[in-house]
Amino acid sequence: MNTMQGAPRARRTALALAVMGLCAQAAQAQATEGKALQEVVVTAERRATNVQKTAISLATVSGEEMRDKGQTTLEAALSDTPAVTVMATPQGGQVFVRGVGSQGDSNWVDPAIGLNLDGVYSGRAERVFSSMYDVARVEVLRGPQGTLYGRNATGGSVNVLTHNPGPRLGGAVNLQLGNYNLRHADGALNVPLGEQWALRVAAMRETRDGYFSNGGRASDLSAGRIKLQYKPNADVSLLATVDSFDSSGAGATTVPRAFAGGPPFFNWKTDYANPWQVDDLHPADVQRTRFTTYALQADVNLGFGLLTVQPAYVKSHRMTQTDLVAGIAVPGTTLPLPETTWEETQKTLEIRLTSPARSPWQWVLGVYAFEASNVQTGVPPSFPPPTWESYDTRVPATSRALFGQLTAPLMPGLRGTAGLRYTRDEKTYHYGVHSTSVWTGTAYDSGIQQVSNTYSAATGKLGLEWDVAPQSMAYAQWASGYKAGGFGIAMPPQPYEPEHLNAIELGMKSRFLNNRLQVNGEFYAYQYKNYQVMYADSAAPSPVPGDSTASFMQYVVNAGAGRIRGFELESRWRALPDTELRAAVTYTDAHYGNFALAALQNMNGARVVGTPRWSLTLGAEQTWELMGGLLRAGWSTRFSDGYTVSLNDSMPGGNLNGQQGQFHKTDLRLNYAPLDERWSAGLWVKNLENKAQTTQVLPFGRAQITDPRTVGVNVGWKF
């Protein structure tokens, strides 16, 4: 037994040593003439900086790279990011970074990774799988962002930035065709309107057949974005944005997982040769999602600083007909799929004052306000169904924050950073239960009831940055994060406490060989309190008096004090003028503190969901000059030693497969463009192995899995 466990560990250690050895050999190699690695500018610290001069563990993906890889969703763009895992939920996806994340319904538990779309916060799991188009870049900030991105950014932040209007007339069109009858088109048009005005219009349309035998995960997407910019002079800029996204068709679909015990009709057939085969009686879910965002950003140069005012209003709607838990209705009945509807409005306002770009003292001061109201009506799954229970809930939430951060020179080549943020949150839960017995017609109405709680916290950051060499920077910092408490979906609602995290991070960013070799690394140690853990219980007692029906509930409990330890090592090497190699190795040791699931099982020390202990990403890109243009071939493979999928093993039915084993996933791409880049054409393959990984396990033997192999072609024009 020990020998079998030791072999994979030895292979992982060997791979890690090989990566570090590759970097060391390259650093000692004699420099030869060649092209330098490209400089990347980010706005992770609310100002434009070189990513290699930013004291944060940070990954970026450009819009052009997403296009070449055939990536049209945020989930796909994050798939190759070291220390990042996207776990499925019935609504969409939750992002885990270094073992910090939230698995479950984002209506009831806030995400631990802040998602900001053009600076507007979104806590909706649906946005992780929404379509990306006309994207400039995606920035992934690893580690708690409790100062500048304080709204529930316990484990990090993901910032999506799309193209703004520019002074020149032009545009682009991109077409995609692929298997599963994929048809995708997106385009953008930039129009200057005189010397002071500019307009940018972008749109996207996509249809695709489902990946599952019942048509599940079919895509029918439409989106559009309008940006209007007004610059009366060099010191004033106004940018108005209207962004709309509409998705319909088959949503989340579950596949069977066998388990011991239970009624015979839950002993699903699980020996399908095709992992995406669904039971004949399992219907495809129906889902409709709409998001509309109205935002305004005003930037005014006051001389001593840049004032930014950004109000935004977001309206969202989602309707779902699903039976993810039981999978089918009772044999011999014609009961419809349960239907649930969500309506949400969100208002945010952020006001920042930022130091001048070239000032040796870099500082940010700001205030933030958030208001949201979520209304849910519908029928959650229950089994067996002698009653249909209809839940009506309203979950208004508010958040207010004051924040500031200063980076000051202490001596030549040495800078110190200090930041502080105070946040106050309030959560209110209005709920009611209406029930009618299928057999007796007996009705029950609980009436509308209400609970509320207020939470507050101060989070901060202290750090040092040291310019070790002209192209090398080391940093050390302490940072803290906070995530508000709330109420789970259980009836009556069960409150849970806020989550707190303290982190120590030691990192270094370096370039060698005339900017042709880049090696970045960071060690981190997290200590957290009250980690919010969400789990499903299919045997939760019905809230209806005298009803013995087992209902499907999602609880949130707080784990006791726990810790996370790990490191990341990432390298890029322009080995030859037209050859670039990439490698990244991550290690994360993440365990929960003490808590119990429904008092059935003590989970103290259990591995955190969605967090591989070891992962390795290898990739390469080769460029050839061909027929007056450039032909680029790219390859990327991610190796993982697996992760915990779900904590539901203790639920009735037991024996669910809550672990995802070792796997590797390979993506390939080939792209050609003339030197003027007026057009381009490409091929891509995602998940070359055509293997499925489990990303969610639900009671009653159902699971969600990743997508199969997809292949396609890209054609693009610029004008």
Image: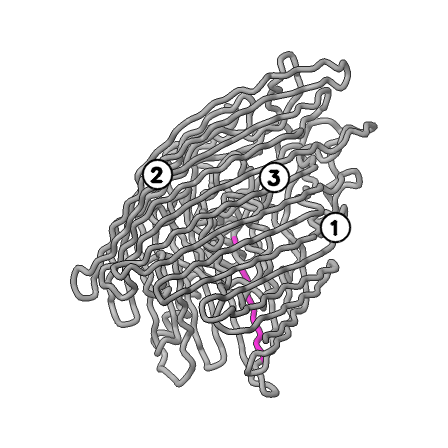
Image coordinates for residue 601, horizontal then vertical, percent = 51, 27
Residue ID for mark 3? 697
Which amino acid does the dot numbered 1 rest on? Ala
The relative height of residue 317 versus residue 200 in the rendered view (above or below) is above
Q: Which residues are magenta?
A: 631-640
The C terminus - image quarter: bottom right
Residue 4 visible in rendering: no
- Which residue of the protein is positioned furthest toward the top in this rendering? 546
Label 3 or label 2, whichever lies nearer to me, is 2
7 displayed left or right of 411: right
The relative height of residue 103 versus residue 497 in the rendered view (above or below) is below
Residue ID for mark 1? 273
Which amino acid does the dot numbered 3 rest on? Val
Dots 3 and 2: beta carbons under 8 Å?
Answer: no
Residue at (24% x, 62% y) in the render: 466
Residue ID for mark 2? 423
Which amino acid does the dot numbered 2 rest on? Thr
SS of the residue at dot 3? strand
